[in-house]
Image (cartoon, rainbow, N blue to C red):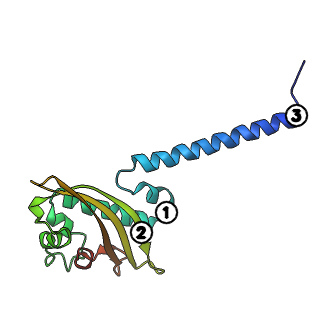
Amino acid sequence: MNCFHPIGGSTRIISLITIALILFIAVLVLFIVFFDKDGTAVYRLVISREKSLLAEKSVSFFEDLQFKDFQKSASYHSPEDQESVDIPKLIARIFLVKPEFIDIMRYRVFSIHVDSVEKRARVFLKVQFRVLNTDKEYEKDIILYYYKDQRDTWFMKLESSLR
């Protein structure tokens, strides 16, 4: 005896496809949430190219700070201002710790705001760090400010970002 009913069978197939699609989306979201160590994957996948670029620049900046490459971290500033910026002094001011005693452990982009003409931006990050020789860990919210120059290149306003 054949139990196949044309309408019921196609409804079952549509239901299975819907369930499979929902499971795929759920797995994709879980992958992004749990395996995105720096918070940039969402911006690369679904957000504008400008925001993706800003997220990558911000993560790269904190990676340079993490490895105490102050010359490279100053390079995110405009070429005119790179010589005058004092990254170690700015780190001490924002984290209230001398640069040689800070261990930046993790950083994650959690929001990016770009103005309506895409000339100014703010990148919000959470930074986890510890103070060496104390084993105390802290988390700080940081905002990095960017502006776009005449050549359409994003530069960080380090002085205002790390105050």
Q: Is residue 30 visible?
A: yes
Residue at image mark 1: 47
Q: Nearer the viewer, residue 21 or 137?
A: 137
Residue at image mark 3: 6
- At x 89%, y 21%, the residue is 2
Q: Is residue 63 visible?
A: no
Q: Quadrant of the N terminus?
A: top right
Residue 54 location, quadrant: bottom left
Q: Nearer the viewer, residue 83 or 86?
A: 86
Residue 158 location, quadrant: bottom left
The kind of residue on which mark 2 rests is: Ile
Would residue 8 appear left or right of 29 to someone viewing this image?
A: right
The kind of residue on which mark 1 rests is: Ile
User: Local crowd at mark 3 within 10 Å, few (<14), some, or many (≥20)?
Assistant: few
Q: Nearer the viewer, residue 7 or 46?
A: 7
**SS class of the residue under badge 2?**
strand
Position of 125 relative to 36 (above/below): below
Image coordinates for residue 121, horizontal then vertical, percent: 38, 75
